[in-house]
Amino acid sequence: MIGVGAVYAVAGLMFAAFAVLTLRDPAHPKRYRRSAFWALLGLSFLAGDRLGDLGDGLVVLGLAGLAAFGGLGLGRPQTTTPAERLEGAKRWGDRLFWLALIIPAVALAGTLGFKALHVGASPLVDPKQASVIALALGVVVALVVAMLILRPPLSAPLQEGRRLADLVGWALVLPQMLAALGAVFALAGVGASVGHLVSAVLPSNSPAAAVIAYTVGMAAFTFVMGNAFAAFPVMTAGVGLPLIVHKFGGDPAIMGALGMLSGFCGTLLTPMAANFNIVPTTLLELSDRWAVIKAQAPTALLMLIVNTALMYALVFRF
Amino acid sequence: MLPLIGIAVLVLGFAVRLNPLAVIVAAALTSGLLAGMAPLAVIAHLGKAFNDSRYVTVAFVAVPVIGLLERHGLQARARMRISQLATATTGRLLILYLGLRQITAALGLIALGGHVQMVRPMLAPMAEGAAQARLGVLPQPVLSLIRAHAAATDNVGVMFGEDIFIALSSILLIKGFLHLEGVEVAPLQLSMWAIPSAIAAFLIHGARLAWLDKRLERLAAESADAERQAGS
């Protein structure tokens, strides 16, 4: 069975190649540190399951240490000039779009179609990881087709990939690091503490107050944790179920759906949701780390009001 | 209550702009130690959780392909294409994308968007190109504003679309958690009650994008004025 391990191996080899190319780039301002960063990440993807928990922990400390003390520098591998790109746009035309769309097309087809593929009685592709595996397959297919059509130098994809990865920099591992932090917080009982705190200060005599405490609490706790999934169990056990459902007789489906969407309003506002809010600022080369959050903040705040109003209007009626 | 100090470390570290990776390690150590774990145990827990979360970073395997296509002019092509459409504006383009992103996400097709595969190589250049075809050369801060709105529109679209798809992880989490608490709900009910918010999100964010067009016109006029004064 093809599992997620194959995808991690592909990613690991890619990061290892970035490490080698960086090391061999004398123009890179911090080539040893940056190369060590990509090498550690490659090691984590290639051998993370064999390093042991403490070994993985030391990798995390290494990545954080390299990023925090002295910085990583920005590599500028040779690429095409704006004039050459304009030339390329005219020469290749819309074929460039079709090549780019291979990735999502294969990802979709794989997510839907892998179920049908079997080797004997067992599925060919791990059904739990189908979407991640399909995405990686889409990348490989797109790469092969693009190389055949565009015929660039063989090193081009890895050098261009390194160019983009250097731009994103340490933010590339930020979402994964935050996910790991969420797990440690859960082990340390942070969620339970917040739950106690919220139910201790909560006014419990009016349905409207309970709804507001629940939706705003979901958004606020999501803001801190960066993830509505972490906030939902805490806020629902602390406020949603005891007050809205059990005490005031609200409908649990409406509460759950609108509660989660209130959490998403917090996601749109927080740098902790790094893959949504911080990674794009690096990818789009924006100097303001809050630029994306600023662009979506009015929508997020208005939607929090809308979700709260909808919940109050609907939850006690059905 | 002591582990909550970890959250304080996190907020404070971010506020004084220390490197976020270091802040995260410090927050994890603080919470773990105050919860009574041994230092090496906290590091091991952090390492295990990091290793188990590798799927979060997998989206970046697309960078060699995206970089290769950029090298051959993908972004330039996106700008060129949009400037051929006389009716295209930044706001209209992003409103169209918002609607498509919400609908496809509601059908479970989340892989169709995203910052690495869609926003950087295609959506952001198109949004810039539409503004430049209509308003002329724009200064960098205005281009940055347009790019930020391209990313924001992708985020709003996916978040207020995906909750309508019944097999999505957030729906399954809601159902699973309520089930543990002894309350039964059907996934279809949950996705149905996400629809009013999805419509509201389209109207609110769409109106803001229409207003963005007006704002871009004003910013372009201001920068043209400033240039004329500098020239005279």
Image (spheres, coloured by chain):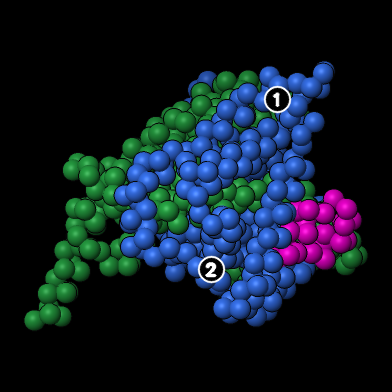
* Chief SS of the magenta region: helix
**Labelled pair 2, 1 in contact (Cβ < 8 Å):** no
Q: Which mark is residue A77?
A: 2
How many residues crowd mark 2 within 10 Å: few (<14), some (14–19), many (20+)?
some
- Residue sitting at x 82%, y 54%: A47
Q: Amino acid at mark 2?
A: Pro
Q: Is residue B231 magenta?
A: no
The letter of the blue chain is: A
Q: Which is closer to the viewer, label 2 or label 1? A: 2
Closer to us: B226 or B69: B69
Left/right of residue A288 with respect to residue A164 in the rendered view: left
* Residue appearing at x 65%, y 48% in the figure: B58
Is residue A94 found left or right of B191 in the rendered image?
Answer: left
| Image position of A279 with respect to B87: above or below | below
Q: Which chain is green?
A: B
Provide the chain ID for the residue under circle 2: A
Labels 2 and 1 in the same subunit? no
Can you identify the residue that label 1 sits on? Answer: B183
Q: How far is the residue under mark 2 from the one under mark 1?
A: 57 Å
Residue drawn at (37%, 53%), measured in percent from left and top?
A88
Q: Secondary structure at mark 1?
A: loop
Q: Residue at x 69, y 51 (%)?
A: A11
Mark 1, chain letter?
B
Q: Which residues are magenta?
A: A37-60
Figure check: A202 above or below B200 = below
What is the three-letter code of the residue carrying label 1?
Val
Q: Nearer the viewer, residue A175 or A146?
A: A146
Quadrant that contains the N terminus of chain A: top right
Q: Position of residue A306 (x, y in %)?
A: 42, 39
* Residue B158 can be seen in this image: no
